[in-house]
Amino acid sequence: MEEETNFTANDKKRILIIGATGKLGFEIAKSSLQASYPTFCLVRPSSLSDTDKSRKIQILSDSGAVILQGSLHDEGSLIEAIKQVNIVICAVNSKQVLDQKPLISAIKKVGSIQRFIPSEFGLDPDRTHISEMDQGFYSRKSEIRRLVEAEAIPYTFISCNFFMSYLLPSLVQPGIKVPPRDKVTIFGDGNVKGVFMSEKDVAAYTISTVDDQRTLNKILYLRPPGNVYSMNELVQLWEQKIGKQLEKIYVSEQDLLKKIEETPYPYNMEMVFIYAAFVKGFQTNFEVEAPGGEEGSVLYPHIKYTTISMFLDTLL
C-alpha cells in the first residue's frame, strides 16, 4: 500500500464513480446515493462547461455526492480520488475502454481498493467471437479484463447485454428510431434470444454487488426472465400491443454478413451487434453458473426491473 487511507474496514463502503456524467454512470451514481453509500464522482474540468453534464453534476452534488475534478489521463487526480474510497466503478463509454489502463495502474499503486468494476456493461467480451468485424470493440474489453486479473485487483465484471435505449426502440431494425407498423425485418431464423436491460436497472444491480462476497472476482450476468426474447417473440409481442400483423422479411445470416461487409464502419455496427446477439446467440448460448458467473436476478430478486413488455408500452 502506498499510503494509509483514513477510514476503517468497518465503515460503509465509499464508492468512486468515473463517467458519472454519461447515461449509465449518472444512473450508477444516483443508485449509489439512494443506497446511502458515500459517493464520489471524478469529473473532467471540461464537463463543468457542458450544459447537460454540468446539470447532472449539480443534481448529484445536491443529492450528496462529493464532486472531484480530474481525469483518467491525470495520475495525480486519480490517486487522490482513489485514496478516499474502497470501491471504484468506471462507466466511461466504449471508445474510452483502453483509457482505463492508467486507472488500473493507480488502483494498484494505492493498494487499498476492495472492488473494481471496470467499464464493460455489454455482451461478455470473452464469449463474443465475431472475427474483428467489430473493429476490436470486444477485444479491447477483454484486454482490460486480463490486465485487472494480472494485477490481482479484486473485481466484478458486469455483463448486462443490450441497453433498452439501443435497438429496442426500433424493434431491432437498423437505421430507424421508432418501431415499425407495417413491415419488419427479422435476422436469421428469428428464434435466437437476446437480452435488453434499462440503464437504471443495470445501475441497481451494479450497486448491489459492491459489498456482496458472492460476486467477488466473478462476472455478474443480467438475464432476467422478462427481458430475454427472440426477434420472433419481440415482433409477436409488438403485434399484440398494436393489434396488427406485420409483414415479415427474413434476412439470412449470409445476407446479413454481406450487408455488414458492404456498409462502412461505424455505420455497420448496429448490424454487427444484431449479428452477435440475434444470429450467433452470444448473449444466451451458455449457462450462467459458478464458479465464474452469477445471474443478477437470482442474487437480487428484490430489484423490480423494467421488462421488455413495459418498455414497449412506452412506445405505443
Image (spheres, grey):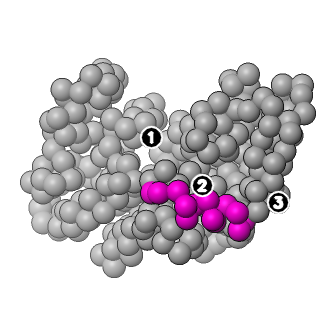
Q: Which amino acid does label 2 sit on?
A: Met
Rendered image: mark on residue 271 = 2
Secondary element type, mark 3: loop
Does 305 sit left or right of 118 as displayed?
right
Residue located beneath label 3 in the image: 189
Q: Is residue 8 visible?
A: yes
Front label number (3 vs 1): 3
Between disc 3 and disc 2, whose residue precedes?
3
From the viewer's side, name the closer residue of 88 and 212: 88
Structural distance between the alpha carbons of marks 2 and 1: 23 Å
**Distance from the alpha carbon under mark 3 to that under mark 2:** 15 Å
What residue span does the magenta drawing correspond to?
Answer: 253-265
Quadrant position of the C terminus in the picture: top right
Tell me the chief SS of the magenta region.
Answer: helix
Where is residue 155 drawn, in percent x and y? 41, 64
| 28 over 89 or under it: above or below | above
Residue at 76 percent across and 57 percent down: it is: 251
